[in-house]
Every structure is written in structure tokens, then in C-alpha cells.
Image (cartoon, grey):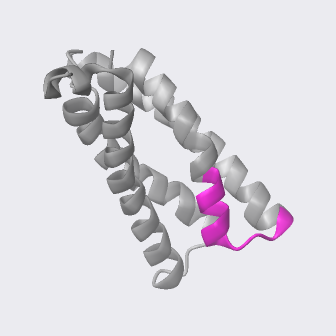
Amino acid sequence: MQTSSQWRNSHIGKFGLYIASGLLSTGSHYVAMFAMIKAGGIEPTAASALGFCVGALVKYILNYFLAFRSTQPHRAATIRFVAATGALLGLNTAIFWVLQSGVGVHYAAAQLIATGLVVPIGYVVSRYWVFE
């Protein structure tokens, strides 16, 4: 039987904690996006991209300290995180734009699909490059 420390350090444990922190950061992304669209009148693709940035701030803190318990100096982890997040932001925005503007999928559904496609890639990049 694994101790809680062994579980946290296992692939399954880290993925579980990544998902939990991801739910909080994704929630931040979605709340910001919906607020910008509904209250701010911001175009959905721009709101999605800006909301992604809000979620990224939450994600860095939770991933560094909780999900991956990184021992990387913040300077190194931050530089890698910004690079990885920039690429993931581009991917999320492209998927969202194609679905929402190109195909006509409602922005909420488009964001759910984009998130589902980006999360696994984000985990691999975060686990093996950004925080390890």
C-alpha cells in the first residue's frame, strides 16, 4: 500500500492533482470568459484567450506547489511555464475560433471541446518539462 507521499509522486497521483488544480484554473478561465462575454460585451474568441490567461495564473501556483511539488527554481519554472502556456494558449484559441467562428458551435461548447483537447497536452508538457 502506498503512502500519501508515494501516491502524490506517482504518475497517477500527479495526474489526479493536476486535474484537481486544473478544475480550479479552468473554472477561473470559464468564469472570466463568461463575464467578459456577458457583462463586458467582449467577442468570444478574445474572451476565451483572456480567460485562458486568468486561468494560467491560478494554474501556475497550484501546479508548482500542489500538483507537481516542483523543486525547480521559480525563475526556470516560470520561463518554461510562460513558453508552454503561450503555445497552449495559441492551440486553445485556434481550436476555439475554428469551432465557434468557423463551424458555428456555441462558445460554451467550443470552449469545452478546446479544453478537452488541450488538457492532456498541457499535462505532459507540465509534468516532463515545466515543473520537473
Question: Most extreme residue toward the right, as rendered?
Answer: 103
Residue 55 x/y as whole percent? 38, 52
**At 14% across and 23% down in the image, what residue appears?**
3
Q: Is residue 111 left or right of residue 5?
A: right
In the rendered view, would you say 124 is above or below 54? above
Residue 77 x/y as whole percent? 31, 21
Task: Count the labels in the image.
Answer: 0
Q: Quadrant of residue 29?
A: bottom left
Q: Is residue 78 left or right of residue 116?
A: left
Q: Is residue 77 left or right of residue 15?
A: left
Question: Most extreme residue toward the bottom, as rendered?
Answer: 39
In the rendered view, would you say 40 is above or below 66? below
Image: magenta residue range: 103-114
**At 26% across and 20% down in the image, what residue appears?**
9
In the rendered view, would you say 32 is above or below 91? below
Between 7 and 57, the residue placed more toward the observer is: 7
In the rendered view, would you say 43 is above or below 41? above
**At 47% across and 53% down in the image, what residue appears?**
52
Residue 6 x/y as whole percent? 20, 19
Q: Quadrant of residue 62?
A: top left
Q: Quadrant of the C terminus?
A: top left
Residue 128 x/y as whole percent? 43, 16
Residue 102, magenta (yes or no)? no
Per the picture, the main secondary structure of the magenta-coloured stretch is: helix
Residue 109, magenta (yes or no)? yes
